Image (cartoon, rainbow, N blue to C red):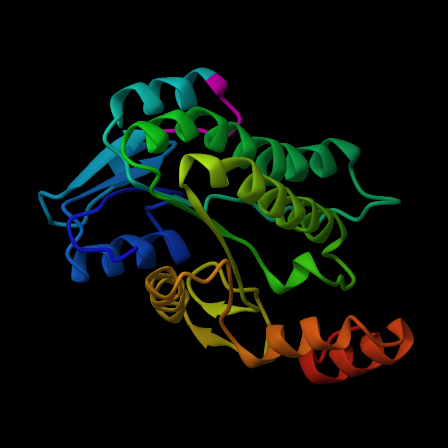
Amino acid sequence: MHITDQVALVTGANRGIGRQFVLELLDRGASKVYAAVRRPETVDFGDSRVVPLRLDLLDHESVEAAARTADDVTLLVNNAGISTGASLVKGDLAEVHREMDTHFWGTLGVIRQFAPVLSANGGGAIVNVLSALSWFATAGTGAYAAAKAATWNMTNAVRLELAPQGTHVQSVLFGVASTDLAMDGYDGPMIEARDVPRSSFDGLAAGSIEVIVDDTTAMVKEALAGDPADFYAQITAKLGVS
């Protein structure tokens, strides 16, 4: 898939990585971009091709309504998410549930609603924005990492299920990007936020089903086949975390 003349929908489009996806879509010639957010009044791109749209991952009725409105979508970018910092053992269990409800169930709910839309429009593509933390965890990332891990393998399953209708499903994984949502006090490797959509869309053009944006994430994936003790010693040293 090439982006020119595509009709895209980006969740969590008003800030962070989501905003960078919208900007990259506009630069690459998308004909329309639905900026799907909980508060559409916060959307401001200064481009008539951007259509603000209410969508809350935890509000199924809003997802259904968005799919009815955006019935011309050919590219779905699932970017919206949260990070509560909840630990799995001693953290607030409600926050742990919120992580899974948002990343896994919320993303899956959007896919289920838009899969028929994509099919009706020729198949199209889905991009799921994931994380290097789909493949490992550090202190303070337990709930987030578990939710992203579940979403990563959900992406693999959805890819198989939607292949017969011609929908290409891509996962995008990276470490930390330089956005207003970057972790406070983090001084490890960081990529430019715009590198994420650029890598994703280059991957769509090449037919890639999994895009690894940065060297840190590539190292994480490569190390998974080895001894976990060696892996965690390596990753904590590289990222400066424990």
Which residue is at a point 19% across and 61% down the rendered structure image? Answer: 28
Return the residue found at the far front. 164
How far across and down, in percent of the image, does residue 9 sit?
31, 40
Of 86 and 156, the residue lying toward us: 156
How far across and down, in percent of the image, does residue 220 sit?
69, 73
Which residue is at a point 57% across and 64% down the rendered structure image? Answer: 183
- Rendering quarter of residue 221: bottom right
Left-right relation of 75 to 7: right
- Residue range in magenta is 55-60
In the rendered view of the protein, which quadrant contains the C terminus?
bottom right
- Rendering quarter of residue 180: bottom left
User: Is 15 part of what is drawn in magenta?
Assistant: no
Of 219 and 189, the residue lying toward us: 219
Left-right relation of 66 to 159: left
Q: Is residue 80 above or below residue 232?
A: above
Q: Is residue 114 above or below residue 78?
A: above
How far across and down, in percent of the image, does residue 126 sit?
42, 45
Which residue is at a point 27% across and 52% down the rendered structure image? Answer: 22
